[in-house]
Image: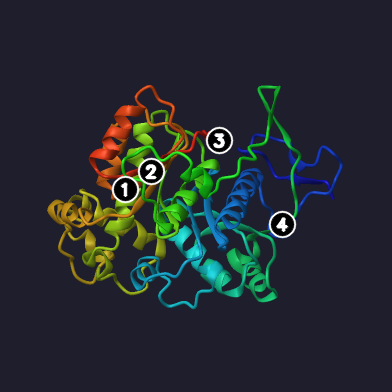
Amino acid sequence: MNELALKYGCNPNQKPSRIFMQDGNDLPVEVLNGKPGYINFLDAFNSWQLVKELKAATGLPAAASFKHVSPAGAAVATELSDTLKKIYFVDDLELSPIACAYAKARGADRMSSYGDWVALSDTCDVQTALLLKREVSDGIIAPDYTPEALEVLKAKRKGTYNVVKINPNYNPAPIEHKDVFGITFEQGRNELKIDEAMLMQNIVTDNKNLTEDAKRDLLIALITLKYTQSNSVCYAKDGQAIGVGAGQQSRIHCTRLAGNKADIWYLRQHPKVMNLPFVDNIRRPDRDNTIDVYISDDYEDVLAEGAWQQYFKTKPEPLTREEKKEWLSTFSGVSLGSDAFFPFGDNIERAKRSGVQYVAQPGGSIRDDNVIETCNKYNMTMSFTGIRLFHH
């Protein structure tokens, strides 16, 4: 089958809609359940490329959580600490390597991952399916599914959950096209290989040290950016993206947005947050939203006049600005990637506040010297990759 009709395009008024192969070959995907839509397939194909490249670059199973054609999270399969299991709410589950990868991809920014599209580099097993079963999600793409996993997923969302199988050996044509305003654009596919050699070829700071963990995390950040709407910046730590700033017109706004998400990820590990006295049987989205409010500076205003009682058994003490500042001062070992050069040192100043020690960016700004000087001030390691990663 080389064509699949869709209900509508980006919006219900955009009809007709379909995906098809112009060369007449069969589509490389098979819908095993549900009826994926236009945006679902955009997320599916972008996220699949991301996890396939992460697996190739690191040798580890990879997963991504996608929303509106940008990743909310991406990760490779490394062992989860007890703390991360708790803040990702998977401490009651048995996790396979691919399930670990998805738990991290989903858990890094649970607010943004609500209603996500899931991509897995490896076969979806029953452990991953059981994790997905209790999350709000639109669909999944993977190279295969175990029979047990498929049974679980087909029962999700009253039988309408979107399950897509992709041929892992599919390679698209080297030239790609898209139409905008009735005009066809053509370009060579971005086949750039992101690997350790790219990171090591031009380290421009006084500190030349890149740990193995830093290399892995910088690869994750850069490959994530390759499939993120530009401008974009990505913070990574412990084998996962922990903050993605996508689609901003200003690079410093990308850095701030992604840095704020990284800060929230780390603040969720604060003992006060981990021990919040939630009421029994609180809905998962309500719990996630309440944690986000608790960490924010608006907590006491939002939960004033007894409103806290619908979420907590007892009213928790606020997490003060002083406590947050003190906790964030211990944040370290973070890697940062940017899809284009940093034009000013202010990006590095903001990144430092979120524990960044390692940076990878293309370089090429007329103010590179200022950016390098700022990194040297904080003894950071920065690599110039020489490659821009815009994605539109």
User: Where, quadrant-wise, is the C terminus in this rendering?
Assistant: top right
Where residue 168 is drawn, which disc sits there?
4
* Labels 2 & 4 near each other (Cβ < 8 A): no
Give the residue type that dot 4 points to.
Pro
Regarding mark 3 in the picture, which secondary structure is present there?
A: loop
Drawn side of residue 226 relative to residue 107, left or right: right
Locate residue 25, reporting x and y percent.
85, 45
Where residue 359 is drawn, which disc sits there?
2
Q: Residue at 34% of width from left, 33% of height from top? A: 252
Where residue 356 is drawn, which disc sits there?
1
Drawn side of residue 85 relative to residue 148, left or right: left
In primary-sequence order, the first of circles 2 and 4 is 4
Q: Is residue 114 above or below residue 345?
A: below
Q: Residue at 45% of width from left, 53% of height from top? A: 215
Locate residue 343, reporting x and y percent.
36, 27
Give the residue type that dot 2 points to.
Val
Cα–Cα gap, marks 4 and 1: 35 Å
Give 333 or 227, whichever is nearer the viewer: 333
Regarding mark 4 in the picture, which secondary structure is present there?
A: loop
Regarding mark 1 in the picture, which secondary structure is present there?
A: strand
Callout 2: few (<14), some (14-19), or many (20+) C-alpha neighbours within 10 Å?
many
Foreground label between 2 and 4: 2
Cα–Cα gap, marks 2 and 1: 8 Å
Residue 84 visible within the image = yes
